[in-house]
């Protein structure tokens, strides 16, 4: 966790930057990159609204699915009993404070599917969320959807997104292949060719 108790955070040349919004702004200035330069004001507004829906709503649903609901015990293997207990307690407290865990699991999954459907509808048949080239919102959307496709143990969630919204599955694969050609090498364990699951 960062000093604010938030994730994500990065350290760049000894400087710690916390929260995805501030991380993006930091690198935009530091590296003179503006992935949104070709967007209209309206598109920038839509992009921001999508990003906030993902970061402020979908995030909490995903946290519950990944850390509290069915099949999560598989991801704790090798961590002993203390780490899982701490993480689960932290997630439970945070999601209660955010209000999302006051809903039933069924209701949380309905909320989550509404967000997923919205992203799928916005993407449609486009290559990326805002058109033919990736923008900042694609960094955010991919980051969250990748957790479902590549790090989630909740099979019903993976099936829901992959089968009901195939454009999102294709989108994730497109982003992965474009930016992480070495993806499989990066997720191997102890130099083996077996991906961490």
Image (cartoon, grey):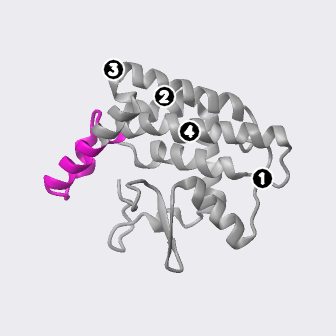
Q: Earlier in the sequence, mark 2 or mark 1?
A: 1
Mark 4 or mark 2, earlier in chain: 4
Mark 3 sits on what residue? Answer: 104
At which x and y percent is residue 95? 35, 35
- In the image, 5: left or right of 115? left
Residue 171 at what x, y percent from top left? Answer: 64, 43
Q: Residue at x 39, y 28 (%)?
A: 99
Write down the quadrant of residue 7 in the picture.
bottom left
The numbered dot on residue 36 is 1
Q: In the figure, 40 relative to 82: above or below?
A: above
Examine the rendering and report whether any part of residue 78 can be seen.
Answer: yes
Residue carrying label 4: 54
Element under disc 1 = loop
- Give 126 or 113, whichever is nearer the viewer: 113
Instruction: Give left or right: position of 119 versus 108.
Output: right
Q: Are marks 4 and 2 in contact (CB under 8 Å)?
A: no
Proximity of marks 3 and 4: CB atoms separated by less than 8 Å? no
Marks 3 and 1, how far apart at CA: 38 Å
Which of the two residues, 136 or 191, is positioned nearer the viewer here?
A: 136
**Marks 3 and 4, the one that precedes in the sequence:** 4
- Identify the mark nearer the N-term, 3 or 1: 1
What x and y, as percent, mark residue 196?
A: 35, 58
Query: Start and end of the magenta stretch?
Result: 66-90
- Secondary structure state at the residue bearing disc 2: helix
Residue at 35%, 70% in the rendered image: 192
Is the C-beta separation of discs 3 and 1 under 8 Å? no
Q: Are marks 2 and 1 in contact (CB under 8 Å)?
A: no
Residue at the extreme bottom:
13
Q: Secondary structure at mark 4?
A: helix
Q: Which mark is residue 112?
A: 2
């Amino acid at each position: 966790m960062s000093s604010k108790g938030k994730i994500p955070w990065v350290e760049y040349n000894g400087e710690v930057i916390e929260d995805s919004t501030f991380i993006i702004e930091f690198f935009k200035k530091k590296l003179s990159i503006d992935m949104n330069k070709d967007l209209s004001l309206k598109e920038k507004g839509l992009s921001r609204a999508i990003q906030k829906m993902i970061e402020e709503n979908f995030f909490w649903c995903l946290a519950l699915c990944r850390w509290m609901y069915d099949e999560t015990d598989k991801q704790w293997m090798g961590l002993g009993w203390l780490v899982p207990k701490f993480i689960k307690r932290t997630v439970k407290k945070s999601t209660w404070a955010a209000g999302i865990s006051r809903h039933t699991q069924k209701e949380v999954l309905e909320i989550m599917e509404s967000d997923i459907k919205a992203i799928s509808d916005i993407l449609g048949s486009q290559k990326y969320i805002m058109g033919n080239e990736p923008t900042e919102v694609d960094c955010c959307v991919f980051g969250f959807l990748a957790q479902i496709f590549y790090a989630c143990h909740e099979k019903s969630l993976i099936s829901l997104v992959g089968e009901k919204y195939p454009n999102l599955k294709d989108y994730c694969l497109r982003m992965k292949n474009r930016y992480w050609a070495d993806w499989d090498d990066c997720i191997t364990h102890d130099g083996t060719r077996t991906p961490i699951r």
